[in-house]
Amino acid sequence: MSERIPLHNLSFKERVDRDLNDPALRHNFREAMDFLMDKRKGRFTDDHQLQLLRDRGSSIRKRALSKLPDLLEQLESKLRENGIRVHWAETPEEANSIVLDIARHHGAKTMIKGKSMVSEETELNEFLEHNGVEAIEADMGEFILQLAEDKPSHIVMPAIHKTKEDIARLFEQNLDDCEYTEDVDTLIQSARKELRRRFHAADIGLTGVNFMVAETGSLVLVENEGNGRMATTVPKVHIAMTGIEKVIERLDDLPPLLTLLTNSATGQPVTTYVNMISSPRKQDEDGPEEVHLVLLDNGRTIPYADEEMRQTLQCIRCAACMNHCPVYTRLGGHAYGTTYPGPIGSILSPHLLGLEETKDLPSASSLCGACGEVCPVRIPIPDLLRRLRHEGVRKLKKDEAPVIRGHGAKYTHTEKAAWLSWSKLYSSPAMYRTFALSATLLRGLTPSKMKGWTDYRTSPKPAKKSLHSLVKQYRKQQDQYSEKQAGDKG
């Protein structure tokens, strides 16, 4: 694979063009997505049971979101009662500052991290490094990307765009006593040896959170590698970072969501580890002396205020929509240029970053509907993509409150005038007939290049005869034939 230009130096179109013209990348993603789709299909063999489970998962998430403010207050109360310290952050900058303050309070110089998409969202690693704290990723995929100075391309398997040859070269260059090998088990053991040393030296552990249970004040983490369990037990301080939408109401809401998450994400009945953290260590010797939870808004309250957009927050981060998306499969995650790629990223990222920065994402979809069909909690992703497209080109009325930051980012007077002209043309029979006749007579003047359209398609050319003309000609022929038949009988 050729050297890749850093993402922030490229526009959306440039990233798309780059990745579409990378045969190795497209081949790797096609194989990976086919594998993940087959794994999920193998787990959900009874469609009736699947639909019932999806209904229940959707109901649980909708109920939690309908009570979100109250559940967050209940969660905070329970966590504080259990001895967990709760911090609220409105922006990524606030969240990062909270983590840094905790690190400085403990004189920490190193932090070991389990998987956390929210820390990717806030760019925590770069912030901590700038302020003298070394953050080491412990999730295998994230560890690989950190060594490569790369970004995740998938929310469940962040290094899915890397081949074993890429990883072998990376480990040979960056890990002590690691010779080049393409044996996967040997590569994993080499990384494990390095990470074990880092775990014991770390001052603070940080993880993400999959679900928060308001009823019991519990933080739930699911994982396969054990790095999350190490990061939450070996260091003396554990910090959990997550978005405010991850709360659920009751403990008995958890099993259906775990079933949907693990089966949809990796085709597993359950992950290797399901961790439930409800307090710091007590009488036992294991566990951290302090536990902190950082709850991040970062634009999440914006879709919450709109009944339709609120459905975006139902997501349980399984990535099934990515695995089944034909566009994501051909592009990979980096083309989107955001922390959350694929269909879910195209409806979530505009709220987190604003439509000015993400105006192209809602259109980066064929609207085939595959994402909505496989979403385990029934998020109507195609409907939300259409809504965002509409909000992106709609001009607000006087005194109308925007439903998203950067509302109308794709609005242009030229496009507005074009659609008004189209509306008038197609609502007037006389004008339409005149236009159709002109188009057929002047078809030879059709330009061979049309901005945007002909980049990937052939130039459209009016037919020699309009459909109306052809129908009229056909009817005339039918009338003549009928008259002839009648004459022959006479």
Image (cartoon, helix red, strand yellow):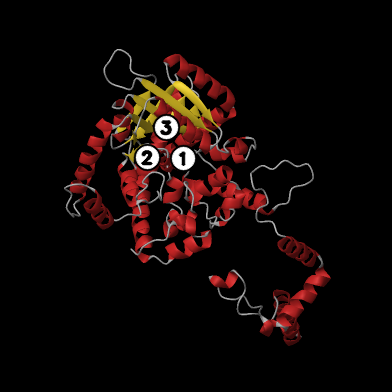
Circle 2 is placed at which residue position? 263
Going by the numbered disc 3, the residue's amino acid type is Val
Disc 3 + disc 1, Cβ < 8 Å: no
* Of residues 108 and 364, the one drawn nearer to the viewer in this rendering: 108
Q: Is residue 431 above or below residue 119?
A: below
Placement of 480 over or under 368, stated as above or below: below
Residue 246 at x, y percent in the picture = 49, 32
Tell me the residue at 41%/28% (across/down). Answer: 104
Q: Nearer the viewer, residue 42 or 352?
A: 352
**Which quadrant holds residue 263?**
top left
Question: Which percent across, then down, holds residue 149?
Answer: 36, 51
The residue that disc 3 covers is: 209
- Amino acid, disc 1: Pro
Q: Nearer the viewer, residue 15 or 480?
A: 15
According to the picture, the residue beneath numbered tag 1 turns out to be 376
Q: Which mark is residue 139?
A: none
